[in-house]
Structure formats: structure tokens, C-alpha cells
Amino acid sequence: EMAPLRPAAARRLALLALVQPAALLRSTPRLAARPEAVGRPAVVRMMAGEAATAGRKSAAVAQGEKGGGGAGRGALDLNPPRGTRDFYPEEMELRTWLFDAWRREAQLHGFEEYDAPVLESVELYERKAGEEVSAQLYNFEDKGGRRVTLRPEMTPSLARMVLGRRNALPTTIKWFSIPQCWRYERTTRGRRREHFQWNMDIVGEASIAAEAELLAGVTSFFKSVGVTSADVGIKVNSRKVLAAILKMYGIDDDKFEAVCVIVDKLDKIGPDETVQLLRDAQVSDEAARKIVASLSLRSIGELQELVGEHPVAADAMREMKELFALAEAYGFGDWILFDASVVRGLAYYTGIVFEGFDRKGELRAICGGGRYDKLLSLYGSPTVVPACGFGFGDCVIMELLQEKGLLPHLEPEVDFVVCPFNAEMRLHAVQVAATLRAAGYAVDVLLANKRADKAFSYADRVSGRRMVFVAPDEWDKGSVRVKDLRLERSEEEKLADRGIELPVAELVAELSRIGVAPQREERGA
């Protein structure tokens, strides 16, 4: 007794029955004896985390063993440069999905997209962070003697562009971008030498309403991809709060930046070592211990109790309370919490600062941002231009989504695979493909003449939803045959199904009549 056919073999038999009935009897024994598993694997390779080459032999070694590379040359390392990534099609689909989610959220909040060259002047970054930033840059001197670098971040480019059209732009602008950024630094989990980053910035608005709008965008994105406030929180602090605390303990403004750098190390080196570093920076022992103790504050109530009615803290407390009130009104109050230990960037930011984190504490910061009212002045603005924004990298969020099982299963959106019966039918096949593409359908065409079973395997591999067969008998009648490859039916029903015959001249209209729309329209893309 013959073993039952596997699904892939049964589908091939159905195809043979459709386009080559005479070949069915000749092919059946071979197909039944050699069924092949067909199907596109799930998209699970990550754009973040460990290098794609982990656990496998170096591509250079593999090539060397085969004798590749040419006479007199060593083997070529086919891996991407350290800290960078290739994006094969399945990874590119995930990247596109993420970028589309970011782009959709920004546009829902009224932001306009912009871009800038990946190559910028080194001076742009030295003005902001000092000459020591050069150690983290992919910088070089071009053939014209200009000092240039691959951009490490986007905000300086934004400032340059705003100042370049400062007399033509609206008073308040809301811009977003998804740039690729480069930093020459040690690679760790969630940190690469290149990454993509979603930036949203509001320039020209001084009120705390701008920060609230940014946080609304961040939390709305999280919700849209299935992340909840139980998974992720956003810590909020303010430069004004820390400045008020330092004033209370007798720390002058000229020591503010140095103190920020030191207390930023608290999580890494612990309270005792942090106190010692503050002493080394000419901060008294009593003040150093009180400063470190104040970083444990975790609520607005605790903060109010500490600062009391201190005049320097009044504005900071008003802003913080207003932000939390706006968060409740927006509907993301359960996402944010006050945390005095968030001091990263306070030497650069001028007001509110925030940082997204996973509540398990296993990942790096997911996103971060704040108010930077002095940045445009660094680049020549004669007046202070209020501004705030955030950066949201692609590496950590993809790692989080994978751990939570929230990455989508993506497949190519191929509506039709057009299959010419033979070489003589190819001209007609490409005419059919062109007609379908003009109507918005995603169409693949078999470029080489294949046997029917091979054509069916190809359609399966590219996730084609339907096949259009262009064969002499139907074409002579002015029609083609269309078969749905994704219907849930028994194998017997599939074998019996020869598809439907549709007129070529009215093909698009007939497809519309029977409810066959492009997949992108069905998904609302």
C-alpha cells in the first residue's frame, strides 16, 4: 500500500493536474517517493543582541578552505565590520516593520519627517561635547582637507538645519527622523557601533506641554506593539531639581557639571565610592552624603518633603507636578515615575530629562531624552531657542520585543506568481504581470522555464498567495487560470481544484468582483 502524500507533494500533483494532465501519471510515483518540505521559516533572527556570526565558522575561514580569494591573496572576511550588521531580507522585513511603526506614531502626533547627510563636520559635535568626543567618532579628513565624520547622533544636524532656515520656519516645529548613527565604542549587549534611532523633537515651545507630547508619542508606540506599562517604565527627573538640591547643600553652579558626571556613576560604583569622588571634587563630606542620599528619591511627595519651600526649587516642582498631571490626562500616568537617580545628560539638558527602562532590569536604557534649550545657542543662535526631544534606538527595543514574544511573523506580500506554460507563453505572461502590477498587486514572475512541480515549489517559497497560469489552451480563448494556494482545504479537494478561468481583458475587474484585493490594501498599508 502506497504511503499517503505529504502536503507539498499533494499540491504539486494538483498543479500538474491543472496544467499538464498527461504528465500526472508519469510524475506521480516520483513525487510520492520524494516529497519535499516546503515553507518559509519564521522570521526570528534579531537585529540586536549577539552578532549574527556567533556559533559558526568565520566566513573567511570557510572561503579559505575552499581555496577562494584569488592567487596571492588571503581569504576575504565576508562578515560585516565589527559592531555593524547585515540585513538579509527576513531581517529587513522586521526593520521596515519597526520603522513603519515609528513613522506612523510620529505622524499621528503631527510630526514631519526630515533627514540630513550621514557625513557631517567634526566641529558640529566638538561644539556640543568638546574635543574629547573625537575618540568616539568615525572621523577622517576628506580629500579636500575637511574634518568630517559619520554622524554619532542627529540632534546637532537638526540644530544646524533649523538655524539654516531660522527666518523661514514656523515659530514651533515638530520634526522626526530615523537616522543611522555611528559611534566607535566598545560593543556590548544592546550597544553596537552603528544603530538606527527614532528621533522626535519639538523646537520653539518652552512649556512642559512639549515634553508631555513627546512622552505621549513614546508610550503610544509601546502600546501599539503590545508592550505594557508592566513591561516598561519611564523615569523622569529634572536638571532644575538637581540644581535646587545642590544649591541647598552649598554646591556652586560652576561645579554642577562635574557633580553630574560623578553621581551618574552611582549605579556602577556604589554610594561609598561616589561620596569619595565628590570629596575629591571639593564637595564637603556632609554635602556629598546628602547628595547621594537624595538620589534615592522615588516620588514627587518625597521630593517636595526634601526641598520644602526652597525658592530655587519652586519652578522645578511646578513643572514636575504639571508633567504628571498631563500624563494622567493623556492616559500614560502609569508609565512614568519620578526618579532622582536619573542624572545622565543633565550637564547637557536644561530641564526635564527622561529615560525608558525595562522593569525587569535586564536591558540597557530603551530610550531617553529631555529639554535642551541652550543647544542652538552653541551653534550661533543670537537668542535662546527652547527645544526638547528624544532618541529611541532600534537594538534594545528589538531585543525586548523578541523576549516578550511580540515580534510579528512576516512573510513577503506576493499576491500572484505568474507562471508561463513554456517559452512561447512568456511574452503573454509578462503582459499579465504588468497588468496586475499596474492595479496595485504584488506580482512575481517565473524568470526561468520550470516544470510544474518546480513552479509550485517556487510559489510556496516566496509565499505566493495565488498562481496565474498562462497556458496555450486558455490563452487562445482570451483567458488565464487562477488558483488560490492558501485556502484551507483537504488534500482531495486541492487535487480536484483546477482553479478558475478569468478573461484577460477584464482580469482586474473580475478579481475585484470576486473580492480579490491586493494584500497591502487588505492590511491597511
Image (cartoon, rainbow, N blue to C red):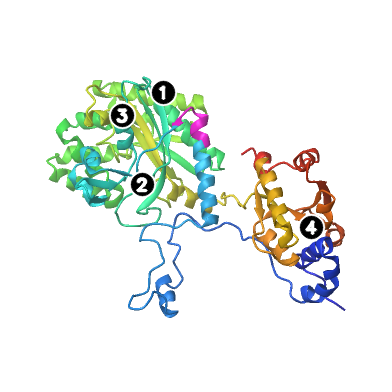
Identified by mark 4, the residue type is: Ala
Of labels 1 and 3, earlier in sequence is 1
Of labels 4 and 2, earlier in sequence is 2
Q: Mark 4 points at which residue?
A: 471
Identified by mark 1, the residue type is: Ala
Indicate the position of residue 266 as horizontal and vertical percent values: 28, 46
Label pair 1/2, CB-CB below 8 angstroms: no
The span picked out in magenta is 104-112
Marker disc for residue 351: 3
Residue at image coords 37%, 33%: 389
Identified by mark 2, the residue type is: Cys
Q: Name the residue under label 1.
A: 209
Q: Mark 2 points at which residue?
A: 181
- Of helix, strand and loop, which one carries label 4? loop
Of labels 1 and 4, earlier in sequence is 1
- Of helix, strand and loop, which one carries label 3? loop
Front: mark 1 or 2: 2
Decide whether residue 504 is among the magenta residues: no
Identified by mark 3, the residue type is: Gly
Give me the C-alpha separation between circle 4 and circle 2.
51 Å
Rendered image quadrant of residue 50: bottom left
Residue at image coords 70%, 65%: 450
Indicate the position of residue 469 as horizontal and vertical percent values: 76, 55
Rendered image quadrant of residue 387: top left
Label pair 3/2, CB-CB below 8 angstroms: no
Give me the C-alpha separation between circle 4 and circle 3.
70 Å
In screen coordinates, is 152 left or right of 96?
A: left
Give me the C-alpha separation between circle 1 and circle 2.
28 Å
